[in-house]
Image (spheres, grey):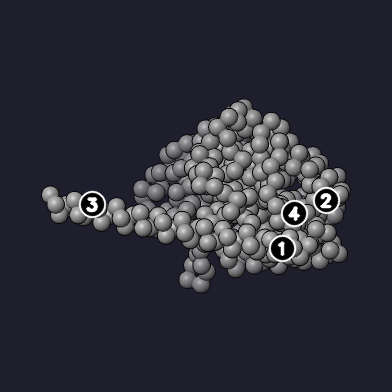
Amino acid sequence: MAKVKRITIIIVLVVIAIIVLLLTIRFVNQYLIKNEAKKLVANGGISELVELDVNGTKQFLLIEGKEKKKPILLFLHGGPGQPFPFGVSARGAFPQITEDFIAVYYDQRGSGKSYSKDIPLETMNINQFVQDTDVVVNFLLEKFKRDKVFIVGMSWGTIIGTKYSSVYPEKVDTYIGISQFIDNKETQKRANVWLTEIAQNQEEQKMLNDLNSLNAPPYTGKEDTLLSNYISKYGGDNYSDEKVKKANIFGLLKWSLISPDYTLVDLNKAMVSGASFSLKEAKDLQNEINQVNFSEEIHSLQMPVYIFQGVHDKVTNYELTKEFIDKLAAPAGKELIPLLESAHYPNDEDFKVIYSKLKEISANKGS
């Protein structure tokens, strides 16, 4: 009994030591990030957390840039409910971007620091997110005395960004999509065909049976989970091969763990409660996402359009995105930039492609 007690005490002490170590690492990194932010501001830049009243909810932005005269780049993160990597926790994370832009990292309704249990479920709809974005854009235009902003959507954020750019073209200088959403039903249909071919070639009978058991898309609930698991298994979300490394998912999340703008409560909101609220509880939003079809809804965009798409992406299908871009009327110009080493999540090499293109876009604007 005494031996068991000693072992229990040792385990408890080890756990406490690990927790203290992790909190110390977090505290040290928070200090370093805040110190760099102070230097940025002292040299004429900006690095500030902003709380806004957005259509009846408290929402947060992190604004950061080396020079206040640079173009404004508003990020609309993925999910819904997953503010990584371009959310409020990104202070100091992307000097490659803040060198050429005023980056605005925004935790959307129900996400991260902007999550609240008091948010009405009925407000979790696409139009509400578009209107929320308009409040944010108007705030930024007023704050920096500008006429337009650049919009960058990532995955789910491309739904908001594309719709916003269509409805408010006069406020959008350039639209940029990363892992562009087009039509989830068609994407799921094509993913099923792709996976079926793999199953047949590899004689995976259980996989074939699973795929054959699916009804017509859109898939929801257990069917969506089944398809997503197979997509993940075969690299349709995070691609790798003998020469290509996977996207570093921890790298996309790590800034939230050490962010000086995220309390531990905020971290829980970003990782757990906000994600659950947006992805599971907001069922009407999920159903609405499944009805979006930009191939039918969006035929033209008036501003320059740049789309970064992983060629191996089966979550937001590359071929479908290419078909959309080919047909899109964009009098100010359009470009599809293939991310050759990535699926849905860009890996480190393809993030370099994104940063390089953003720098080029900024330079072309004469900033």
Tell us which disc is closer to us: 3 or 2.
3
Q: Is residue 112 visible?
A: yes
Q: Is residue 64 above or below residue 111?
A: below
Looking at the image, is mark 2 or mark 1 earlier in the sequence?
1
Describe the element under mark 2 as helix, strand or loop: helix
Residue depicted at x 27% and y 55%: 11
Residue type at tag 2: Phe
What is the number of the mark on residue 73?
A: 4
Tell us which disc is closer to us: 3 or 4.
3
Tell us which disc is closer to us: 2 or 1.
1
Q: Is residue 239 visible?
A: no
Residue type at tag 1: Leu
Residue that mark 3 sits on: 8
User: Is disc 4 in contact with disc 1, using a CB cutoff of under 8 Å?
Assistant: no
Return the x and y of residue 9 as percentages of the image width and height: 25, 53
Describe the element under mark 4 as helix, strand or loop: strand
Give the spatial CA distance, label 4 vs label 1: 18 Å
Residue that mark 1 sits on: 40
Return the x and y of residue 350 as percentages of the image width and height: 62, 65
